[in-house]
Image (tube, grey):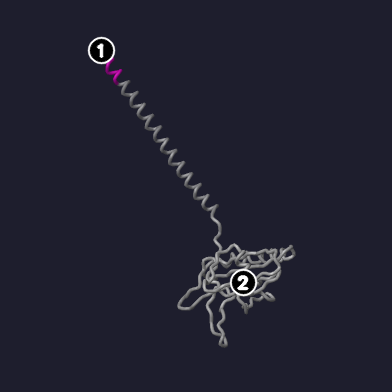
Amino acid sequence: MSFKVYQDKLTKAHYIAKTQFMTSALHQLKQLALIFMLSIAFSSCDQLKDMLGKKPVMTDAESVDLVTPKFVQQFNELKDQPGIQIALVIDPKDQGSAFFEIVSFDQNTLTAYDVLEKAHIEKQYHPGYKKPEVLVLSLNGVTRKKINGRAHDWAFFYLENKQWKLSPKGIGNYELKDGDMIGFSFSSWKNINGEFKPEKTPLDLFKQKP
């Protein structure tokens, strides 16, 4: 083989190797570009998904404003049903979220204690008191305590003419009838004419929207 023929073959082989290398490199660059573009696309989809999936956050007050009228409406509709229907409202104020439940009974004689016992809530009573003299210590995890140096406790109310009235009796002695509404408010207490009374009533079920 002449030197010229050998040189031509070597040049051709070098050209083929160079071409294959460039083709392979180009293919790898295309793959990297595709992976990069896909990652951007998926990232954008995730961001878009997050944006579409986010729900507006409501405050507790806004949530209560939505729930309260529906609760009252449902209770008014159920009052005509057989048995005894009692509306229960638990308002822990800034210590938690308000709780609503319509509690149904077949029995004719019942007390507020019976309502708490049947309601789907967490409750704790003072161990030093026996039924009917029942003292509530905790409702839904909110326990009587001092806040800013002031004692806070659960106060028991009943609804009369759309207004909350402090019950003159304890929950074990307060008898209920069909359609009654009772409420508990976590409140500090103050001395009014020689008598300690809670400063806060349960939330207003019939508040007029501005």
Q: Nearer the viewer, residue 10 or 133?
A: 133
Badge 1: residue crowd in 10 Å (few <14, some 14–19, many ≥20): few
Mark 2 or 1: the one toward you: 2
Residue 185 visible at all: no
* Quadrant including the N terminus: top left
Marking on residue 148: none
Residue 192 location, x and y as percent? 56, 85
Seen in the picture, residue 104 relative to 173 is either above or below; the reply is above
Give the number of callouts: 2
Pick out the residue farthest to the left. Answer: 3
Q: Say if the magenta span includes residue 155.
A: no
Q: Mark 1 falls on what kind of element?
A: loop
Label 2 vs label 1: CA separation? 110 Å
Give the residue at x 60% y 67%: 116
The dominant secondary structure in magenta is helix
Pick out the residue farthest to the bottom. Answer: 193
Marking on residue 2: 1
Badge 2: residue crowd in 10 Å (few <14, some 14–19, many ≥20): many
Residue 9 location, x and y as percent? 30, 18
Give the residue at x 68% y 76%: 160
Give the residue at x 56% y 63%: 58
On the image, numbered disc 2 is attached to which residue? 183
Quadrant position of residue 12: top left
Q: Range of the magenta residues?
A: 5-10
Q: Counting residues from the N terminus, which is met first, the one under dot 2 or under dot 1?
A: 1
